Amino acid sequence: MSSEIAVDAPSEAAKNQFALFGTRRFWPLFAVQFFGAFNDQTFKNAFVALLTYRLADRLMLTEGQVDSYVQISAGLYILPFAVCAATAGQIADGVDKARMMRWVKFAEIVLMGIAAVAYLTQSLPVLFCLMFLMGAQSAFFAPIKYGVLPQYMKRDEMPAANGLIQGATFLAILLGQIFGAKLVLTEGGVLGISIAVVAIAVIGWLASFAAPPAPPQGPKPRVNWVMPVAMVQILIECRPEKPAMFAMLALGWFWFAAATFLSLIFQIAKFSLLASEDVALILLTSFSVGIAVGAVLYSIIVKGRVTLKTAPWGAAGMAVGSLFFLAAVRNYGAGLEGREGLLTVGEFLGRVDAWPVLGALVFMAMFAGLYVTPLNVEYQVKAPEGRKGQFVACSNVIDSLCMVTSAGLAAVLIGVVGVPREFVFALAGLTGFAAAYIVWRRAQRED
């Protein structure tokens, strides 16, 4: 293993989290993760924006059909995390994770090459299939990116490393959402997206070559290639490690709520706020920046300690923020009755009733960052040595099952029952009160 891999001496990162960028133990992984998240969102949101604002009119789709297609695409991306994650975790614990990272990133280049052709031909069936395949690629990368962190980092570096990666991931998500949705709707944007997704994949692949070796830390696990069986098996095998399992279940709730929030943003912007796709990007900006700020605040607050103390406040803040958001959207829209055309960014921001909507999103997202980051640190630290990748995979299985459930419930509530989107948004957030109480009880038992 590289001489840069974690040792027992006290770390500068406990005092200054940005010192991690000066080491190969961190910056290559950070770069690969950043560009991977950026490219995922570029591809996904270009598809959602193209479907919502261009193909819907061309194919004469109803509002309900657009909502259903968007939820289906979200489910297709998430499903492989449940199906493939367990097998991916077993593979990751038995090989050098840095080498596996390079192979997974090369697979992304191949998939994005196919995506380029699909965008140019605007083939919905192929794009839907690629949603699933990109989810599978991400499912194989996940046990590397979080499983290798405890191998590269010292214990007191873990909060800082997670805070930086968590914050940067949501910023990458934000930038990818803006870049993908904005570019694809411009003149010549479909060609631009086709080139961009391949180029970004190549950048991530090149960055992976700078990562230090990360050989297996325990016996090579048996790989179960029957993926549905492996999914059940990994849940059973990880269950006895109660602190790690609790953190993973609590993270599952976050992704249940967050998947609902993020999948509804474009539809809320267009149909509830009567606003353009650019306004949807402003909403995504508010949410993503808020989470990034909350994640960095967590690492500043805990100062190198591994603790759940901020998580209950985070869940409660998300619940309160979702109520604020519901009230803001329901009180929005005076004078817009009978208006033709969607509001531009300038028109939207010029409305007094738009600012409570943005404020509620930022409020909720900052508390989300305070919730999710300590739970990520908790299960990474508490998972047994030599099985980190399998625990990351287990977390991905739980998260994906929660997100698929979220997508299915949202599709039924909106498309079948007819519940307004903002109410579905708030209902997902309100479950945060229960999450806050449960995590608070666990935090009280910490040393």
Image (cartoon, rainbow, N blue to C red):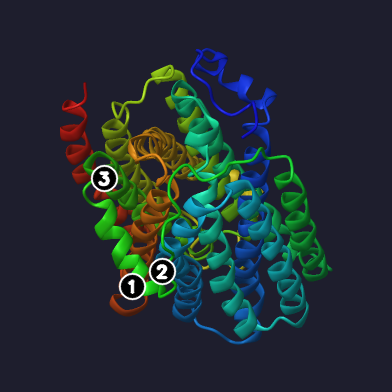
Q: Dot 1: what SS?
A: helix
Say which of 42 and 307 sits in front.
307
Q: Which residue is mark 1?
A: 229
Instruction: Indicate which label's residue lies in the foreground, 2 or 3.
Output: 2
Q: Dot 3: what SS?
A: helix
Residue type, label 1: Val
Instruction: Indicate which label's residue lies in the foreground, 2 or 1.
Output: 2
Q: Is residue 84 left or right of residue 124?
A: left
Q: Which residue is mark 3?
A: 432
Residue 58 image position (x, y, % from top left): 66, 84
Q: Is residue 399 left or right of residue 30?
A: left
Earlier sequence position, callout 2 versus callout 3 = 2
Q: Is residue 276 visible?
A: yes
Residue at screen point 30% across, 30% down: 308
Q: Dot 2: what SS?
A: loop
Residue at screen point 57% across, 59% down: 275
Residue type, label 2: Asn
Compared to 313, does 268 lie above or below?
below
Asked if the residue under mark 1 is in contact with the one under mark 2, i.e. CB atoms within 8 Å, the reply is yes
Instruction: Indicate which label's residue lies in the foreground, 1 or 3.
Output: 1
Q: Which residue is mark 2?
A: 224
Residue type, label 3: Gly
